[in-house]
Amino acid sequence: MASAVRAVWPDDLPLLLRLSATDWLEGGWSVDESVELSRRLKACGIDLVDVSSAGNSPAARIPVGPGFQSEFAARIRREAGIATAAVGMITSPAQADHVIRTGQADLVLLGRELLRDPYWPLHAAQALGHSVAWPNQYLRAAPSGSTGR
């Protein structure tokens, strides 16, 4: 199916797929299977796998905690040779920066944290010492020293 989508998808746009790396069930879908599937997806033209997990069964026992799914993204990236995105309780700029700098993933995607703080990317840039150009009409609300675009 990915190759059929890739056939009509513009070459200059990435084709991403979200994958549940494990269902956290004994005898269920495993990370090993996700690595193999990701190899096949790469061969079909998928550019990046957004690596999540679970949510499929109320019987699953999930060790939820900060960055609890990043290890899956790292393993798929390393073993399948495909770009990955990490998700799952990534809430601080330092944590997101660590995921990227240590090669756990190529991209960090946020969900609930953006609901809590829609300006998270701007706050993260400031916390990590990067200046961000703001739209000119927003400059009055920007941190001191911000530039317009």
Image: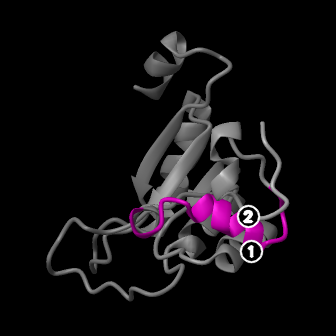
- The answer to whether 17 appears left or right of 94 in the picture is left
Quadrant placement of the C terminus: top right
Q: Are marks 2 and 1 in contact (CB under 8 Å)?
A: no
Q: CA distance from mark 2 to mark 1?
A: 12 Å
Res 131 quadrant in image? bottom right
- Mark 1 is surrounded, within 10 Å at the Cα level, by few (under 14), some (14 to 19) or many (20 or more) other residues, namely few
Highlighted magenta segment, given as a residue range = 115-131
Question: In which quadrant is the N terminus drawn?
Answer: top left
Give the residue type that dot 1 points to: Ala
Task: Assess disc 2: are there few (<14), some (14-19) or many (≥20) residues with their C-alpha within 10 Å of its C-alpha.
Answer: some
Q: Which mark is residue 127?
A: 1
Amino acid type, callout 2: Pro
Q: Which residue is mark 2?
A: 143
Q: For the point 63% across and 46% down, which residue is it? A: 138
Q: Tag 1, which secondary structure?
A: helix
Q: Is residue 139 above or below residue 8?
A: below
In what element is the residue under mark 2? loop
Q: Nearer the viewer, residue 147 or 24?
A: 147
Residue 68: x and y, percent? 49, 80
